[in-house]
Image (cartoon, helix red, strand yellow):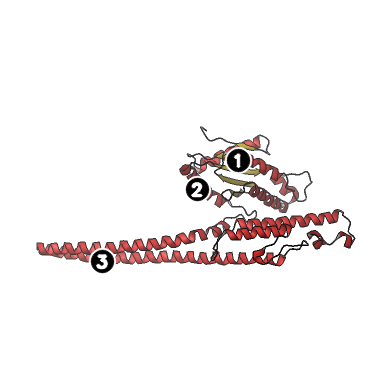
Amino acid sequence: MGLVEKIIGSKEEDGISDGPMHQQSESMIDGALDTLSTIYRVFGDESFAIDGEIDPAAFNDACINFVRHIENGAAVTNHGIPASENGARDWAKLRRFFGDRRRQEKAFVTERLHDYRGVVDDLIGGLKQIGERDEDTAISVKHSLSEIEAAVTNGKLPEIRDALNKTVETVTGTFDKQKAEYEQRITEMNSRMSNLRQDLVAAHEEMQRDSLTDVFNRGAFDKALAQSLNARFILGQPITVIFVDLDDFKSINDQFGHAAGDDVLKSVSDCLTRSFIRKNDLVSRFGGDEFAVILNDTTADHTAILLDRLMNYLKQIVVPSAPAERRITCSCGYTEISTNDSTESLIDRVDKALYQAKANGRNQASYFPIPND
């Protein structure tokens, strides 16, 4: 008995003909399994190392094994799941594996955020101590200068010489001590911050996600764009920026409701992440029905190929409650980053490319070349 029969029953046993209802049930189950497999793939691809993990890649490998179990009942030996002979799946262990990992990640991030706050508190406390020591140094120097002044007043050269030597020794010793303390504190702080920096990346990224589409938000795009400008200037590698604007999206909200519009935006973000799949590609919601993409180490020629793939994916989106012939299209503008670009000049050029795509009839991509390219 296959998986579908186990869930909805055998056609022969239940007297169900191979009709529309049964076909619809099979389609729903296939879609659910495909969605669950995708969730586990993303779960593994976007994971980060937590305390106690010797091999961070092992978790991703485990997720891949669970995907195979979901899709065809393959064994997951490290978690005590044998190969399925009749289409059954160990749903309890699938749920437990997912839930346990999420709880571990939450505990890990919470602990690291607490550690980070501790580092900040230590830094503030250290600065206060430095200020207090600086006051002590100032008092010591003033006292030594007073001794020099008294010696000058007396007019005795040996006393002046002794006072000067004593002042030099006092000030030099105090500054040497402070320098050593500063260097030690800075070394300690750098070490702690270095250990925490990578741990906080995942938490930082979660804070930059768009709540509806789960792609990055405008703030994350702005930061990444500034970093890309620096990378292009320093490394000279090609970087392409894309603006994607949905064609006639307002009519979807007006005719079929905002819930349908939200479903479309989620589907579009899914198409974008399937089109630009590398970890160093950044897909973000720029605002409303507009998205922005940054493709590192990617030329305009290669970008054109990827945009064709995106537009083919968009054609498969079904608008809820809309006639079957209603399809989603988009206009895209893109350009490569120049070494002389500023944020303003780059966005202006991408905007011009986008407007050109719309002026040419929409449902297409337009490239705006680098000046003097």
Number of dots carrying numbers: 3
Q: Is disc 3 placed on a helix, strand or loop?
A: helix
Q: Nearer the viewer, mark 3 or mark 1?
A: 1
For marks 1 and 2, give the CA distance. 20 Å
Viewer-nearest of discs 1 and 2: 1
Residue 369 position (above or below residue 66): above
User: Circle 2 — which element?
Assistant: helix
Which mark identifies residue 139?
Answer: 3
If you read the primary sequence from the N terminus, does the residue marked by circle 1 or circle 2 appear first? 2
The three-letter code of the residue at mark 3 reads Ile
Check if mark 3's residue and mark 1's residue have beta carbons within 8 Å: no
Foreground label between 2 and 3? 2
Residue behind mark 1 = 303
Question: Do the CB atoms of the residues marked 2 and 3 lie less than 8 Å apart?
Answer: no
> Can the viewer see residue 250 in this picture?
yes
Find residue 87 and report its horizontal and vertical position in percent: 77, 61
Residue at (56, 67) in percent of width and height? 107
Q: Alpha-carbon distance for marks 3 and 1? A: 66 Å
Q: Position of residue 280 (x, y in %)?
A: 56, 49
Residue neighbourhood size for the residue with mark 2, other residues' Cα within 10 Å, grouped as few (<14), some (14–19), many (≥20): few
What residue is disc 2 on?
227
